[in-house]
Image: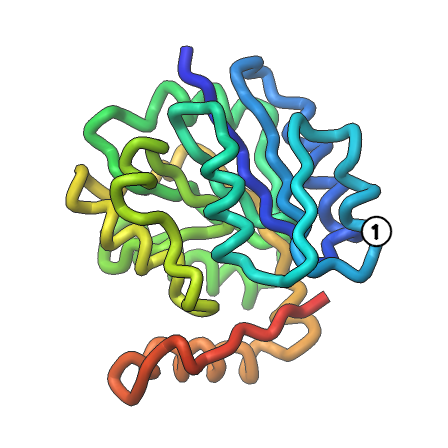
Amino acid sequence: MRMISVIIPAHNEEQYLPRTLGALRRQNYGWLEVIVVANGCTDRTAQVARGRCERLIVLSQKSLGVARNLGARMARGELLLFLDADTTLGPTALRRIATNFAATDAAGTLKGQPDDRRVAYRFIYFLKNCIHRLALHPGSSGVILCWKEHFVKSGGFDEGLEVRENSDLMKRLKRFGRYRYIGEITATTSMRRFEKRGIGRTTWWWMKVWLQPLLGDLRQRPYEPVR
């Protein structure tokens, strides 16, 4: 039995966090702890999380990288699962992750699916899942899996990055083993950015993010949250 530490960085997530935490409470796997790191919140995120997780950390400044790294340092589990605050897991997910994520796996993610069944959104995730399944890009769909030992040795998340910080970490983790896409387990993720900004505008923004390393330093690219 492996202890899994679920780390949720949360910035103004009072709307989505209850659903995410509720799904974790329904897991059929008892060897877990949930760590919520509320960072730079101006809403009721901390109040929503209090009493629904094993550890609540409150930071005055917004920083995804700092929140994730601090949560990992506080974690007691040997397996770390970084979970977006707007992403939910099915009731058997953690048990199946504990079974499927092997010692030879260094980084991984799950099959992503949108919380809206619109055809365009399903097609976007079909493409994203194909890229991850074929290991064309070591990305994530609201979930990042890794061993704590490897996370510490890799140096954790680059706190200077706001975009592509996930793939940056996974590339560094791959020196310890392989990238693993677990397609039998699904993570359901909010499509709020696409809903509020539009599919075309959001797709164009991500294309520019992908091209940014060719044109300049990614540390100059901010990531604007959508709430």
The image quadrant where one finds the N terminus is top left
Residue 117 x, y percent position in the rendering: 63, 55
The answer to whether 133 is drawn above or below residue 91 in the figure is below
Q: Is residue 164 above or below residue 117?
A: below
Q: Residue at x 47, y 63 (%)?
A: 123
Q: Nearer the viewer, residue 8 or 140?
A: 8
Dot 1, crowdedness within 10 Å: few (<14), some or many (≥20)? few
Position in image of residue 78 (x %, y %):
39, 24
- Report whether 88 appears left or right of 171: right
Q: Amino acid at mark 1?
A: Arg
**Could one spot residue 41 in this view of the protein?**
yes
Q: Is residue 73 rendered to the left or right of residue 46?
A: left
Residue 86 visible in this rendered orientation of the protein:
no
Q: Is residue 29 left or right of residue 198?
A: left
Of 79 and 57, which appears nearest the observer?
A: 57
The image quadrant where one finds the C terminus is bottom right
Left or right: 90 in relation to 144: right
Q: Which residue is mark 1?
A: 44
On the image, the x and y values in percent for residue 94 come to 50, 25
Q: Is residue 122 above or below residue 179?
A: below
Which secondary structure lies at badge 1? loop
Nearer to me, 118 or 95:
95
Residue 178, image quadrant = top left
What colour scheme has been applied to the protein in the rendered image?
rainbow
- Please name whichever residue, 76 or 205, is drawn nearer the observer in this view of the structure: 76
